[in-house]
Image: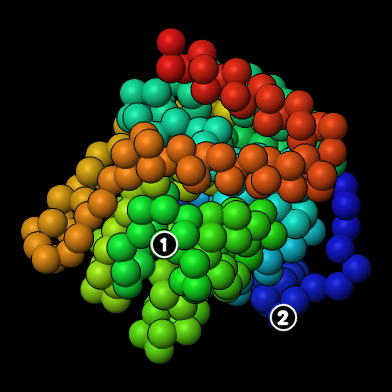
Amino acid sequence: MKQLAKFSLGSLAMAGAMALGVSAAQADNWRYAMEEGMNDPQGIYAAKFKEVIEANSDHTVQIYPVGSLGESADAMEQAQAGLLQFIDQSPGFTGALIPEAEAFLVPYVQPTDPEVVQKFFRESVAINEMFHDIYREQGLELLSVFPEGEQVVTTMEEFRTPEDLEGMKIRTMTSPLLLETYEAFGASPIAMPWGELIGALKTNMVDGQENPTIWIEAYGLDDLTKVMTYTGHAQYTTAVMANADFYDGLSDEDKALVQKASQEALDHILDVAVELDAKGLAKIKETNPDYKIVRLTEEERAAFKERAQAVEEAFIERAGERGAAILEQMKKDLEAARK
């Protein structure tokens, strides 16, 4: 397993907390970190995972919501070092560590239709077969990949073409590929952690951002912008992983339990995430009736799809042959899901 040479303050704090306990592989209390709150999609998945583990064993699962252990990079550091047994993190933050995972950020290679989304994430060869060994190289056992909702762009001004986006400062997650995506789309992207976004919108440091509707409504991002645009370019996707050394040290019975909990949590969130997206949009319409909601037509999306080719090329340049193979398989998986 890849070990890190140094730890952040958050990692050292976690190490100290574990110093009096037993090793991770033997611990009855399993630690699980995520990037969201308990009422968000990652929290709903984690709660179901915890429920299944605790209902079928003597183990307990301690969940650390967003901010509990520092920023996303801190939590991943702790997971790789074995201080955490489980972690849920989006490819938007793990892309620097696992370039191939940024395939989920390439525009227009994932579905947005709810029924197609379910089929795609359940049956995708790329997701369920090709990523396992790649995550293993970083000391991680990939358990689940699931969508949290269609990415929607909120801005101060309406846009329908890449030319309309020129000069707009759009916040993205700290992913080089997301920066290149919005550059290709015509905007001026700015990468920043989630914790800085609301302040940046309030002070006009950025003019807009992208997130699923559940996040836009829950955190009042519609109150800080004037237009919400469905471009159809992506799902917000996240991955649940276990520390590989911890997982390998489990008994066959506990490995089967972890897989059972992962599958049941995945089945649960694939149903719930679609409902949350719809509820988020309904609440925005109810509480902010003057908020402008735009859905680009297929003709309007064509201009963005054309520009997305440059993003694909940038992804393949960084992720190499394996990344290219994964991207090609994702396109095949998308076509199969649509059929």
Q: Quadrant of residue 193?
A: bottom right
What residue does disc 2 label? 9
- Residue at 36 percent across and 53 percent down: it is 160
Tell which residue pokes out farthest to the front in this image.
163
Residue 44, image x, y percentages:
37, 47
Q: Residue furthest right?
A: 5
> Which disc is residue 164 wearing?
1
Disc number lying in front (1 or 2)? 1
Q: Give coordinates of residue 97: x percent, y percent.
A: 77, 54
Callout 1 amino acid: Asp
Disc 1 to disc 2, C-alpha distance: 43 Å
Q: Along the horizontal axis of the image, is 321 left or right of 289?
A: right
Query: Does dot 2 land on a helix, a strand or a loop?
Result: helix
Give the residue drawn at x 72%, y 72%.
11
Is residue 296 visible to the viewer in this orientation of the structure?
yes
Residue 8 relative to residue 198: left or right? right
User: Could you classify mark 1 by the number of other residues whose Cα lies within 10 Å: few (under 14), some (14-19), or many (20 or more)?
Assistant: some
Which percent across, then down, holds residue 214? 30, 54
